[in-house]
Image (cartoon, grey):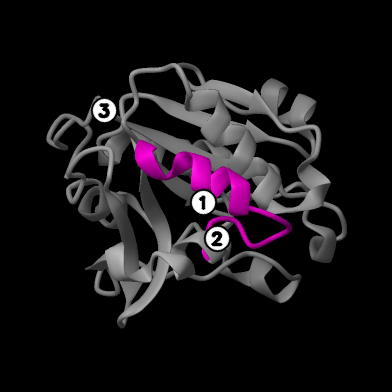
Amino acid sequence: MTLDEAPRHPQVAGLLLAAGGGRRLGGRPKALLRHDGVLLVERAARVLREAGCERVHVVLGAGAEEVRVQAELSGCVLVDNPGWDEGMGSSLRAGLRSLVGTDARAALVSLVDQPGIGREACARVLGAFAGETSLVSAAYDGKRGHPVLLGATHWPGVVEAARGDQGARAYLRQHSAEIRLVECGDVAEPYDIDTGEDLGRLRPGGAH
């Protein structure tokens, strides 16, 4: 699937959480790690666009100024999260609040440190959008993972529940019966880049 071939979804905004400080990586901002010669933040934003999101909001925190200088994120809306060290929940809150007042009816939420999840998985989840009440999650062998599509009806509840590093987990647990799971295990790997050992998954080669 190419960028031109992917169905466009103007009512769904891509929301990339890229504020993490990489505490277990020696304080290296995750957005500035490279995979196949491309910054993770650039790759993840491109994946959302290629999957079908015309609008992409990128939440920055650790190393935000460096990201702004080093990363090619033209066309994206950059959202600063000064409370990024409180955990992923604060970035999710900042990102969803940045979408209020736009024409977005849902947000496709992805994480910067999951380079094994590409456009195919994002496009599958995006394709399950069915209006503002949508609640959709990628699944890997039946287990819920990212990306997650949050219809606008759910944003206030997610913002209220998102604390620490839990993100939308508590809200999704409370609304599990409403979630549509979309299996993506055949096209993606949901690993995180959290520790020094995980860095071995990042290929140092050329353009991706």
Give the residue type at disc 2. Arg
Q: Tell whether 6 sits left or right of 77.
A: left
Residue at figure coordinates x 75%, y 30% from the top left: 64
User: Which residue matches tag 1?
Assistant: 36
Q: Which mark is residue 114?
A: none
Q: Can residue 81 be seen?
A: yes
Say which residue appears at 68% left-offset and 23% top-offset.
68
Mark 3 or mark 1, which is nearer the start of the sequence? 3
Principal secondary structure, stretch drawn in magenta: helix
- Residue 95 is one of the magenta-drawn residues: no
Mark nearer the N terminus (2 vs 3): 3
Q: Are marks 2 and 1 in contact (CB under 8 Å)?
A: yes
Front-lying residue, 35 or 183: 183
Can see residue 179?
A: no
Q: Which residues are magenta?
A: 152-169
Mark nearest the camera among 2 and 3 is 3
Element at badge 3? Answer: loop
Disc assigned to residue 11: 3
**Residue behind mark 2:** 203
Q: Which amino acid type is marked by label 1?
A: Asp
Q: Is residue 143 above or below residue 95?
A: below
Image check: 105 left or right of 23? left
Residue beneath the point at 34% across and 61% down: 137
In percent of width and height, residue 93 lies at 61, 40
Q: Quadrant of residue 170?
A: bottom right
- Seen from the viewer's position, the closer of residues 174 and 10 is 174
